[in-house]
């Protein structure tokens, strides 16, 4: 039986994104099939082996198309002001989400968020969605590009470190699932992403313990009946239908001021629990509720996993990047219909359990 995510992992404040390592000893997965936990020596050796540029250092901001003064801050124009975190309790509905189904377009050692304008500076990434994403990408260039997402209006760029087995890239096959959910109790307060918003979820430099305690951690690496693995399991069932999977959630509260900040994280925060309740609310510092993205990736690899690794390092170095270039009207239609409307929608914005609600998009995944 498939385990559901633990909501408590999502309710930690955004400060958890920037915590320092709590200790050198790593955390193991919670199943018998998990690899032996990396020791402190293993972790130090791994970090040394994957030094920059193979792994992200802390680069100095450079001038780029979206950040012409190169200070690392990209202001929202106009900013969103006068918003208070909502603590309302709308009628309880278990689902308030829709999917973006996007497939892999290409791989490149580029990262237009962390290393803008510096081709080859990053470790290798697997890009989904926009087919033009590279080190020189800007909001405008992506907006003019094509997409491997089902919805033509989703020209956003999604990327993660490339996974390999014995040195050969292993790319997800077909449409991958990227959920857009409500991360706060008041799902009616969620509004669409502003165009150009970008952020990084997780870090290639995080320790196993930091990955395990990350507020976006859901079930870690999983395959077959093996769940909550911090590193890759030693083996996965060698069956035709078994794939290596991971799910990870992004922060969903925005400061309303910046589309990016120098660390690519500080303008975003995870919801927190309102004192005396079980309700998730945005913190006062980041009062604007946006959709909570959840990556659900499947890699076609199984059997012996001893030579499986990420371009960024061990399994616990998993992270991903997002740059929003949705067509504004299309994204608003999906958010209003599915998230605010408390439905469980597919990529058309259609909920099979509530056919009377209709769909947000037509059969071509476009606005009617």
Image: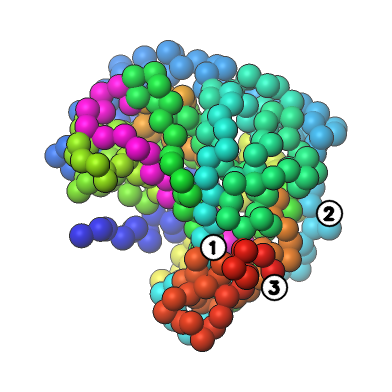
Q: Which residue is rendered at x = 62% and y = 58% of the image?
A: 151
162 is higher (above) or lower (below) than 357: above
Q: CA distance from mark 2 to mark 1?
A: 29 Å
Q: Quadrant of the C terminus?
A: bottom right
- The label on residue 77 is 2
Q: How many other residues sit within 10 Å of disc 2, few (<14), some (14-19) or many (≥20)?
A: few
Check residue 306 in the rendering and tell me which mark sits there, or answer none. none
CA neighbours of label 1 inside 10 A, class few (<14), some (14 to 19), many (20+) = many
Which numbered disc, 2 or 3, marks the residue that appears first in the sequence? 2
Name the spot of residue 302 as percent of width and height, x first. 26, 35
Residue 186 in sight in this render: no
The answer to whether residue 298 is magenta is: yes
The residue beneath circle 3 is 368
Residue 126 magenta:
no
Q: Quadrant of residue 10?
A: bottom left
Residue at the extreme left = 32
Residue in front for this viewpoint, 158 or 189: 158
Sooner in the amino-acid sequence: mark 3 or mark 1:
1
Q: Main secondary structure of the magenta part?
A: strand
Q: Position of residue 254 (x, y in %)?
A: 65, 56
Q: Residue at x 28, y 40 (%)?
A: 229
Task: Report x, y in % for residue 35.
Answer: 22, 30
According to the picture, the residue beneath numbered tag 1 turns out to be 347
x, y percent for residue 24: 34, 26
Circles 2 and 1, Cβ within 8 Å, touching? The answer is no
Spatial separation of the CA atoms under disc 3 and disc 1:
14 Å
- Whether 210 is drawn above or below 347: the answer is above
**Is residue 246 visible in the rendered structure shown here?**
yes
- In this picture the colour scheme is rainbow
Ranked by sequence position, the earlier of labels 2 and 1 is 2
Q: Which residues are magenta?
A: 289-308
Q: Secondary structure at mark 1?
A: loop
């Amino acid at each position: 039986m498939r385990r559901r995510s633990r909501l408590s992992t999502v309710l930690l404040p955004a400060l958890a994104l920037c915590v320092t390592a709590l200790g050198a000893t790593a955390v193991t997965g919670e199943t018998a099939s998990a690899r032996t936990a990396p020791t402190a020596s293993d972790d130090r050796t791994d970090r040394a082996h994957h030094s920059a540029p193979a792994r992200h250092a802390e680069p100095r901001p450079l001038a780029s198309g979206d950040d012409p003064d190169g200070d690392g801050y990209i202001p929202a124009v106009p900013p969103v002001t006068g918003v208070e975190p909502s603590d309302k309790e709308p009628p309880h509905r278990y689902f308030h989400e829709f999917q973006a189904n996007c497939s892999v377009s290409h791989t490149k050692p580029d990262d237009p968020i962390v290393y803008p304008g510096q081709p080859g500076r990053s470790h290798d990434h697997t890009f989904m969605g926009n087919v033009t994403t590279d080190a020189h990408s800007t909001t405008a260039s992506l907006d003019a590009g094509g997409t491997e997402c089902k919805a033509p209006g989703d020209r956003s760029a999604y990327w993660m470190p490339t996974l390999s087995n014995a040195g050969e890239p292993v790319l997800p096959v077909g449409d991958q699932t990227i959920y857009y959910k409500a991360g706060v109790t008041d799902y009616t307060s969620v509004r669409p992403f502003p165009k150009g918003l970008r952020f990084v979820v997780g870090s290639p430099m995080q320790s196993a313990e930091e990955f395990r305690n990350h507020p976006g951690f859901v079930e870690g690496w999983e395959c077959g009946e093996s769940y909550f693995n911090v590193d890759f399991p030693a083996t996965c069932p060698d069956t035709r239908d078994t794939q290596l999977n991971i799910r990870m959630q992004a922060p969903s509260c925005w400061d309303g001021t910046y589309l990016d900040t120098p660390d690519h994280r500080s303008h975003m925060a995870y919801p927190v629990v309102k004192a005396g309740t079980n309700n998730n609310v945005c913190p006062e510092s980041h009062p604007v509720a946006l959709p909570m993205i959840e990556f659900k990736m499947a890699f076609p690899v199984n059997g012996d996993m001893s030579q499986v690794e990420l371009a960024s390092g061990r399994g616990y170095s998993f992270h991903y990047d997002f740059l929003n270039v949705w067509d504004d009207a299309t994204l608003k239609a999906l958010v209003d219909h599915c998230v605010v409307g408390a439905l469980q929608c597919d990529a058309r914005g259609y909920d099979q359990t509530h056919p009377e609600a209709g769909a947000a998009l037509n059969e071509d995944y476009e606005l009617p």
